[in-house]
Image: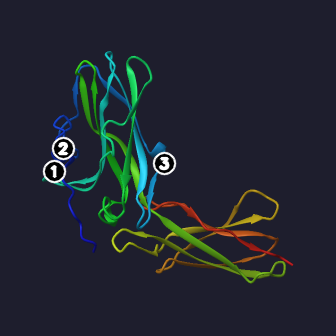
Amino acid sequence: MHHRTAVAGFAGALALSALAMPGTAQADEVSGDIKITKVVVNGGKNIVLGTADAKTFTIAVTATDDSGIEAGNTFPVMWHTPLPNGDYYGLVIPDNIAGKCVHQSSTTTTCTHTLNINPRVDVQDNTTAGTWTVSVHVQANDGDYMTKDSAATAKVLRNARLTANASPEPVKKNKTITVTGSLTRANWETYKYGGYTKQPVKLQFKKKGTSAYKTLKTVTADNKGSLRTTTKATADGYYRYSFAGSPTTSAVASTADYVDVK
């Protein structure tokens, strides 16, 4: 098991006394008529991590108040597992606390913050794959403020890889071909890719000259993540495997393998 290292609570680390510790039983704090109206993580897309490279993403916070939102005083953090002592397994803090703020009107502002997440530092181990929570603090020009413990959620997923190989090539029409492949995913404890076992994977075919793939059958990855099935070759075209993803792992399609039918 990969060693889990607790990350210090951000309120203490950054001395942000206005932002309550996320994950605690405290209710959201609000003073005045300020509202957080929208929080978007990574443009609405999942954050997918491999075994080495950090990923850059954004958290955009939109808030409104009759006095206007104070630029530079909107602060989000993203976290996974809170601990009783205020530390975390998984915590991501913006590179620039001020962010980039755009005033939509005299009352409404959107501040976009850039963050980096590293599979060798922030995710801690495989148990942190899945749903993360975003906490946000915003402040208005007149001193009104709001701290929202769970302002949004985002998926941080283990990257998946998928291969496909159809043979023999070429093949006579209506003869059987065998399509093999492998489904693997990033392991955030060993920093290697390992077989993703017992997962349903679709075998798909796209006839030459067409644009859409059709699913021929569903194959289950074995106890090593390997795939193997047969089908009849009826026309020239491309074969691939396609994995729809899981709550912890990204969707992926293999590179297509072309088969010439004689």
Residues under labels 1 and 3: Cα distance?
29 Å
At label 1, which amino acid type do we have? Gly
At label 3, which amino acid type do we have? Lys
> Is residue 66 visible in this depiction of the protein?
yes
Question: In the drawing, does residue 54 fall left or right of residue 16?
Answer: right
Residues under labels 2 and 1: Cα distance?
9 Å
Residues under labels 2 and 3: Cα distance?
27 Å
Mark 2, residue position: 11
For the residues bearing labels 2 and 1, Cβ distance under 8 angstroms: yes
> Is residue 243 visible in this depiction of the protein?
no
Question: In the drawing, does residue 144 fall left or right of residue 48?
Answer: left
Q: In which quadrant of the rendered view does residue 123 lie?
A: bottom left
Q: Nearer the viewer, mark 2 or mark 1?
A: 2
Q: In which quadrant of the rendered view does residue 232 lie?
A: bottom right
Up the image or down, 151 lies above or below 2; here it is above
Label 1 SS: loop
